[in-house]
Image: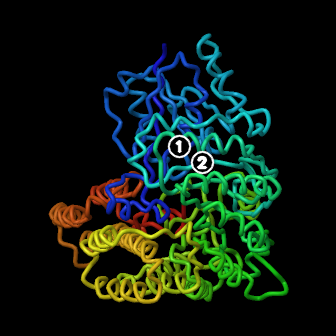
């Protein structure tokens, strides 16, 4: 028998990941590696399997000694962690097999991988294993077509400790009927939304239930309503399943904004137990929406279509989480305030705001390549980096982005809690979704959050809890959960600020060093001393960065190495030397983003 080690690289901290909120609960990760667990179900019984999710447990040397093969599945933000895994596997002489969205797009640029099994693997994985066992495995396997979802097996949730995760996840469909310019989903999974049968989904619900899972369940479809006919068949079946078992799962998913036009389907989602939905809102700017080819976010008869859509979904009983983009071609200086105002007024507590990224293979990538606007640099993990030349001044764009996230997740959380109250004022508390919780548990939750809030946040939090207790007592459990998520989002925003300011500090220290070394007042023979003093100050500043703010791909080590190299350089700089600070390209001065 062969030992197959299934490795899931670490995610960097993100708003979506809720890392700091999960710490309140003693939970290590938001979601399990669903793709890897699905692949695990495709192995024949002659394989011994072990899953190591680096988001919940470290990869030990003993794991590598045990393994005959290492299998990985990754998304783009996991690249830094994946590179570390590959390096360790190569040193241990464990062959590496890579798949998932990131390798599918970037495999030609990746090193250290023995075999790539790309695209959706339901129809290719068995062939790959047979070739591997026969000694004839190829370097790259590609799927000949988009597979029928009926061939997807029930994921191997028994291979993980479910107590380490906040939510389980399942997948109903792949693909999306819309072809938004910036999105790579249709390139990876097609525009025909392929689905599992209701019977398959019930089998997966049953498996989680048998393993003892109770709580949140994320249906990870990129557009859950992409195939309206099939989702309409599924929802009544799930509603009945939930009702028979006392609604053990709180469901949430991702959908397109045109969900609001499907009144009966929204009612079915409520009956099935959906309490939240993530919408790709992107921007309240109609011109930008047209250019990005997002007609589902527009209604020529309603100038406030996005706002009214959010409000209608909230009034049905589902919280709206929203994705937003800055740096679009039709954005101007008003885009930043427009985003803030929309997010605040609509009552969207969790707003995932990001700078536009040109993903390889998308229609946006093709257009920007044609317009000679792509930067010759990889997609970065840094939230303030760009990989293309925006129409707006890059410095203005990055500063505007920082102002938006710094406002919606302000240090006191006042704006955040205002949005929560707006949501709760408009949310219909459906009984089987918003169940009562014991007062003792609520008290413990409130005190757990209070212990972690800053002195500036405590008064705002206390007023918020008092207001919800008075006006929406049934929704107090949700309000406390939102408070924990707000704590995470503010802390993550602070983390981004600390890392960016450190890199900016390196720039200022280097500028001062160059002035002291090469300026009119430079003293002969003092360069080494001045450089050592600068290095000591920089190292002290680096040590002051909290360990919890550091992560693979944060750029600190690279920036430090560049700083030290610049200190030791004998060449006089022709112009001011700027280190690669997040948001700026070292060679072009243009902003750059993940």
Tally of numbered tags:
2
At a point 33% along the width and 72% down the height, the residue shown is 439
Question: Which residue is found at the position 42% from the left and 72% from the top?
Answer: 477
Q: Earlier in the sequence, mark 1 or mark 2?
A: 2
Q: Are marks 1 and 2 in contact (CB under 8 Å)?
A: yes
Q: Residue 415 location in percent, x, y?
A: 45, 86
Instruction: Tell me if 400 is positioned left or right of 442 in this view.
Output: right
Dividing the picture into quarters, in which one does residue 223 lie?
bottom right
Vertical placement of residue 24 versus 11, above or below:
below
Would you call the spot at circle 1 few (<14 residues within 10 Å), some (14-19), or many (20 or more)? Answer: many
Rendered view: 139 above or below 246: above
Q: Which residue is mark 2?
A: 170
Q: Quadrant of the C terminus?
A: bottom right
Residue occupied by mark 1: 208
Task: Using the rendered view, name the quadrant where residue 373 is placed.
Answer: bottom right
Image side of residue 569 versus residue 214, left or right: left
Which numbered dot is residue 333?
none
Q: Is residue 553 left or right of residue 380?
A: left
Crowd rating for badge 2 (residues with CA inside 10 Å; few <14, some 14–19, many 20+): many
Q: Nearer the viewer, residue 440 or 593?
A: 440
**Picture coordinates of residue 321, whole percent (x, y):** 57, 71
Label 2 sits on a secondary structure element that is: strand
- State the image coordinates of residue 566 (x, y, percent, origin top left): 33, 59
Q: Is residue 288 above or below residue 265?
A: below
Query: Which is nearer the eye, 39 or 380?
Result: 39
């Amino acid at each position: 028998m062969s030992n197959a080690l299934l490795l899931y690289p670490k995610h960097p901290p993100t708003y979506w990941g809720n890392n700091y909120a999960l710490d309140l609960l003693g939970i290590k990760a938001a979601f399990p590696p669903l793709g890897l667990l699905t692949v695990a179900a495709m192995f024949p019984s002659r394989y011994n399997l072990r899953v190591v999710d680096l988001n919940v447990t470290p990869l030990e040397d003993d794991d590598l000694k045990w393994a005959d093969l290492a299998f990985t599945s990754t998304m783009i933000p996991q690249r830094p962690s994946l590179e570390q895994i590959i390096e360790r596997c190569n040193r241990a002489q464990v062959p590496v097999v890579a798949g998932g969205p990131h390798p599918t797009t970037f495999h030609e640029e990746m090193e250290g991988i023995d075999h790539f099994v790309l695209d959706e693997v339901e129809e290719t994985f068995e062939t790959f294993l047979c070739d591997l066992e026969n000694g004839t495995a190829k370097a790259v396997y590609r799927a000949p077509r988009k597979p029928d979802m009926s061939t997807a097996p029930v994921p191997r949730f028994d291979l993980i400790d479910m107590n380490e995760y906040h939510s389980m996840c399942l997948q109903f469909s792949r693909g999306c009927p819309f072809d938004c310019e910036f999105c790579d989903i249709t390139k990876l999974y097609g525009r025909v939304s392929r689905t599992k049968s209701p019977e398959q989904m019930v089998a997966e619900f049953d498996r989680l239930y048998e393993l003892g899972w109770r709580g949140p369940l994320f249906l990870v479809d990129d557009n859950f309503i992409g195939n309206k006919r099939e989702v309409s068949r599924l929802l009544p079946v799930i509603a009945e399943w939930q009702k028979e078992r006392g609604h053990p799962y709180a469901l949430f998913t991702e959908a397109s904004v045109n969900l609001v036009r499907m009144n009966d389907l929204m009612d079915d989602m409520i009956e099935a137990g959906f309490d939240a939905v993530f919408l790709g809102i992107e921007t309240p700017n109609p011109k930008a929406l047209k250019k990005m080819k997002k007609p589902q976010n527009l209604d020529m008869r309603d100038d406030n279509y996005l706002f009214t859509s959010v409000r209608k979904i909230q009034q049905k009983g589902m919280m709206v989480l929203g994705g937003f983009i800055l740096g679009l071609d039709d954005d101007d200086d008003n885009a930043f305030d427009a985003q803030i105002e929309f997010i605040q007024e609509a009552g969207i507590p969790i707003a995932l705001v990001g700078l536009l990224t040109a993903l390889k293979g998308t229609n946006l990538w093709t257009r920007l390549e044609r317009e000679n606007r792509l930067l010759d640099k990889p997609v970065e993990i840094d939230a303030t980096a760009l990989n293309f030349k925006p129409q707006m001044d890059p410095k203005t764009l990055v500063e505007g982005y920082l102002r938006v996230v710094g406002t919606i997740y302000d240090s006191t959380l006042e704006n955040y809690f205002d949005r929560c109250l707006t949501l709760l004022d408009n949310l219909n508390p459906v009984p089987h979704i918003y169940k009562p919780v014991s007062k003792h548990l609520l008290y413990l939750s409130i005190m757990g959050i209070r212990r972690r809030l800053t002195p500036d946040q405590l008064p705002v939090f206390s007023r918020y809890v008092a207001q919800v207790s008075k006006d929406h007592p049934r929704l107090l459990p949700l309000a406390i959960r939102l408070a924990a998520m707000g704590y995470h989002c503010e802390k993550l925003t602070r983390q981004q600020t600390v890392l960016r300011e450190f890199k900016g500090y390196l720039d200022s220290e280097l500028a001062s060093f160059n002035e002291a070394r090469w300026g009119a007042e430079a003293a002969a023979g003092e360069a080494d001393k001045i450089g050592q003093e600068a290095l000591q100050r920089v190292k002290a500043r680096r040590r002051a960065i909290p360990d919890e703010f550091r992560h693979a791909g944060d750029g600190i080590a690279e920036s430090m190495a560049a700083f030290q190299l610049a200190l030791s350089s004998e060449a006089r700089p022709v112009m001011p030397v700027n280190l690669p600070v997040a948001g700026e390209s070292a060679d072009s001065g243009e902003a750059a983003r993940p």
